[in-house]
Amino acid sequence: MSPNQALSQALDQIRDDVRAAHAYPVANSAGMVKLDVMENPFRLPAELQAQLGQRLGAVAINRYPAEGTQRLAAALAAHAGMPAGCAITLGNGSDELITLLSMAVSKPGAVVLSPEPSFVMYEMSARYQGLKYVGVPLRADFELDVEAMLAAVKQHRPALIYLAYPNNPTGNLWDADVIEQIIQAAPGLVVMDEAYQPFAERDSMAWLSRYPQLLVMRTMSKFGLAGVRIGYLIGQQALVAEIDKLRPPFNISVLNAEAGLFALEHAEVYAAQAAELRAQREILFAALQAMPGVQPFPSQGNMILTRVPDAPATFAALKARGVLVKNSSAAHPMLRNCLRITVGTAQENQALLAAMKESL
């Protein structure tokens, strides 16, 4: 057998839907003003960088993760204000937790449901686990369509519902009364995805005590540790215990766990960064709103979804000027001509605005 034949035979073993799919795109951002993936733009002060380096240098990297991961989980539970009767499990970012949730409900005929547009990984993970995915369009103002959502819940009886709070890419916090109606109607799990909680004026943690089918998912990525890859899931002990059975035993490295612990010990630094980004968000929103032909949508995240006359052309023109944002216009029909702009530092935001004026 020739090498080409061997390779072809090997590729034939890969599922057809996987071979037909596209990998999640990650843009090359070298040398760019990077405003495309909702990262915290601030690095640690030099003094804390040195302290973190010493901490990481002392970690026993010859050992598998154990106690450090447990300490991190306990610290995150305390930081989040985890209610009594609940438990926490960790993921290699929220993406891994979404995969574990799909695996947990992967029974024949099971359905995963989410409003749309929202985070694309809900659908991707569901389909790769052989689950049916149902997307329910938001209203034109990106609010939940309560009648459509409740009708879909009644019709499809989803095993798992995702509600991003705030939503990605629209940035809004949906009506709390509508969310509670959906939770009450749900026959299975409901996951509140709070990836952008550091920038929002409210969260759903208090609902955990009222709704045993509810799980709250968060990440340290938007907290300021996108490169560390730590997500966490909180819910009733019995429910989290089942999800935890699917978690790889050493999914959080000892270095990542130590970095997470260090960050929580200096939570006030990250809280100040989040406050600065919230302030910059409002400044950026007002500046975008003042531009002719530009429609920014109010946000409670660290991004602003913005409709422009020609999103592909504007995206390309911004990139040519060294500013990278996310072209969301092809992601969903409701996002036609929309760019998703991450809120950066004051200097980065000014660079974006200057480039926008030249690009429209």
Image (spheres, helix red, strand yellow):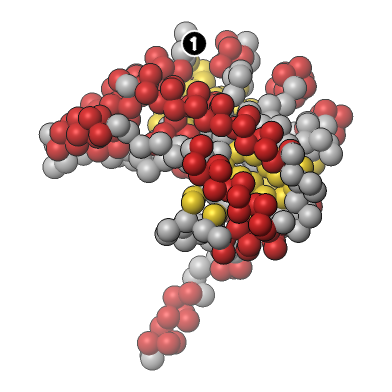
Helix, strand or loop status at disc 1: loop
**Which quadrant of the structure image shows residue 166?**
top right
State the residue at coordinates (33%, 27%): 263
* x and y, in percent, of residue 62 in the image: 13, 42
**Quadrant where the N terminus lies?**
bottom left
Locate residue 154 relative to residue 111 in the image: left or right: right
**Which quadrant of the structure image shows residue 350?**
top right
**Residue marked by disc 1:** 83
Locate residue 292 relative to residue 105 in the image: left or right: right
Locate residue 141 relative to residue 65 in the image: left or right: right
Locate residue 285 relative to residue 240 in the image: left or right: right
* x and y, in percent, of residue 336 in the image: 77, 53
* x and y, in percent, of residue 121 in the image: 58, 47
Q: Identify the residue at the far bottom of this view.
A: 2
State the residue at coordinates (37%, 23%): 269
* x and y, in percent, of residue 89 in the image: 42, 28
Q: Is residue 270 above or below residue 109?
A: above
State the residue at coordinates (78%, 31%): 144
Q: Identify the residue at the far top of this view.
A: 84
